[in-house]
Amino acid sequence: MKTHPTYLRLQSWSRIAGILYLIVIAGGIFSEVFVRQRMLIRGDALATAQYILEHETLFRSGFAITLFYLLCNIPLLFIFHEIFKNTHKPLVKMMVFFFLTGNTIEIVNMLNHFLPLNYLKTGAALEGLGEAGAASMAYMSLINFNTGFGISLVFFGCYCILIGFLIYKSRYLPHLIGILMGLGGICYIMNSFTIFLIPDFAKHLFPYILLPCFIAELSFASWLVFKRISLPPSANELKK
């Protein structure tokens, strides 16, 4: 039996999507865990400023890598739209909206990532600001970035819930991956609102509540790369 050409195209695209998704995951872990969270020394603006200046190349690399994976999100979303567009059109449109909204918030929020260097490099030269003032401004920019990042994850969590449902409904991928993505989305939303409402508790919850998110997205991306999408039972799902 001749394989449907649309299915062959979607299989190729699914592998590209998986590679892009792995880039996004790796870039996100590097930028957040090994750059921003290390640079931000809670309660000590001067120590934070000193650490940033001593590791300026690492700080700039974190910014560049984040910007790169945010760019990768655009073709990734396009491929997801093509894969799932005939599964449930209203939900696909909603998924695209939440994804683009979260990605846009994070792109705009990248200014708060780079501002600390601007303050520390030139802020001290401004009249009346001084080194301590520049350090305080740099510190607050990183705090503001974390707030903006938390906001973006609310929208990204909604995207995860929706694409989890689309995965489950489409039968292109195992139902378990759809369930994991849905649970991951719930965890993203819970994490953000815990940070906003109960910040002291969020510090202890952070590493545990995001673990399901990492497992879900890594499973999804890995399946797309190594297994790719499966042929659905009905050829109608492949029609344009």
Image: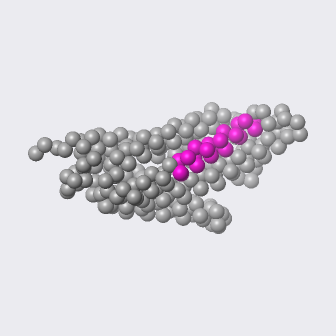
Residue 109 counted in the magenta span: yes
Up-down relation of residue 194 to residue 53 (above or below): below
The N terminus, quarter of image: top left
Instruction: Please identify the quarter of the rendering in which residue 5 is found.
Output: top left
Q: Nearer the viewer, residue 132 or 150?
A: 150
Residue depicted at x 71% and y 40%: 116
Instruction: Please identify the quarter of the rendering in which residue 47 is found.
Output: top right
Please give the range of residues in magenta: 101-120
Q: Relative to residue 218, is residue 201 drawn left or right? A: right
Evaluate whether residue 149 shows in this view. Answer: yes
Up-down relation of residue 217 to residue 165 (above or below): above
Residue depicted at x 63% and y 52%: 148
Instruction: Label the magenta part by its dominant secondary structure.
Output: helix
Evaluate whether residue 211 shows in this view. Answer: no
Percent of width and height locating residue 231: 22, 51
Residue depicted at x 17% and y 44%: 3
Residue depicted at x 61% and y 44%: 108
Percent of width and height locating residue 56: 66, 34
Residue 90 counted in the magenta span: no
Q: Relative to residue 185, is residue 231 drawn left or right? A: left
Instruction: Please identify the quarter of the rendering in which residue 232 is found.
Output: bottom left
Percent of width and height locating residue 235: 20, 52
Q: Relative to residue 83, is residue 73 drawn left or right? A: right
Q: Relative to residue 215, is residue 142 drawn left or right? A: right
